[in-house]
Image: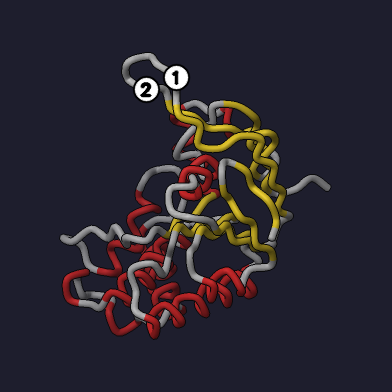
Amino acid sequence: MSAFVELSNVSKNYQSPGGEEGVEVFSGINLTLDEGESAAIVGPSGSGKSTLLNVVGVLDKPSGGKVMVDEREVTELGPEEAAAFRNQTVGFVFQAHHLLPQCTVLENVMVPALAGHGNLTGVSLRKRAEELLEEVGLSHRLHHRPAEISGGEKQRAAVARALVNEPKLLLADEPTGSLDKANADRLTELLATLHETRGLTLLAVTHSTAVASRMGAIYRLDAGKLVRD
């Protein structure tokens, strides 16, 4: 059985505007995750952790190497295929919640399902969004707007939004980075519980030892190389 996520000799570099020698972010990255596994990527700021996560989630393209997710070579997807793949297979949780300020919490959770790549609509979509918000402890905030809820609640709403299309892969980029300790601990526990109960494959970039310690494996990205701690 093949790995659910497999990176083979992946590299990323950026060319300078003047055509001079480019900047290498990382190279020779190899990583495998089986379905249902969890892992954290740690390392110093600026080491390319978020860039690597974006490559796995098809938000960015590698400069070299191959990325396989769910037996698909995602580096070869065209723009429309990539958009559908991100929407249906991957859930994203970022450090900033990116909730739409004009929409209620319930409407924000429903947004990814309205992109036209899935079949969840109408009453079924609303019911699923409500169930997810209950699962993350926000059933009392359905009709509030983001400005009316706390930072921790915003991140939990963002987690619910990431799950609305039932993704197989959840990518979390510094999910607790903007939270105080109490809310960070609650979000960490939520992510760990969702991973266990839903069988999600979870890959998290983090500076938090609390988050990293809840993952099944820890990798360190430093000086352009990824090694298992």
Residue pointed to by mark 2: 16
| Left or right: 206, with 225 as reference point | left
Q: Dot 2: within a 10 Å radius of its alpha carbon, few (fewer than 14), some, or many (20 or more) residues? A: few
Q: State the residue at coordinates (17%, 76%).
A: 148
Badge 1 element = loop
Judged left or right of residue 149, residue 193 is: right
Q: Nearer the viewer, residue 115 or 61?
A: 61
Amino acid identity at mark 2: Ser
Q: Earlier in the sequence, mark 2 or mark 1?
A: 2
Of 156 and 127, the residue lying toward us = 156
What residue does disc 1 label?
A: 21
Q: Are marks 2 and 1 in contact (CB under 8 Å)?
A: yes
Q: State which quadrant residue 202 falls in.
A: bottom right
- Residue 84 or residue 182, whichever sits in front: 182
- Foreground residue among 137 and 38: 38
- Residue 121, given in percent of the width and then of the height, sits at 39, 56
Q: Is residue 192 above or below residue 54?
A: below
* Residue drawn at point x = 36 percent, y = 69 percent: 155
Which mark is drawn over residue 100?
none
Quadrant of res 179: bottom left
On the image, the x and y values in percent for residue 83 come to 44, 38
Please provide percent x and percent y for residue 124.
42, 64
Total number of numbered labels? 2
Determine which quarter of the picture holds residue 136.
bottom left
Neighbourhood count class around disc 1 (C-alpha, 10 Å): few under 14, some 14–19, many 20 upward: few
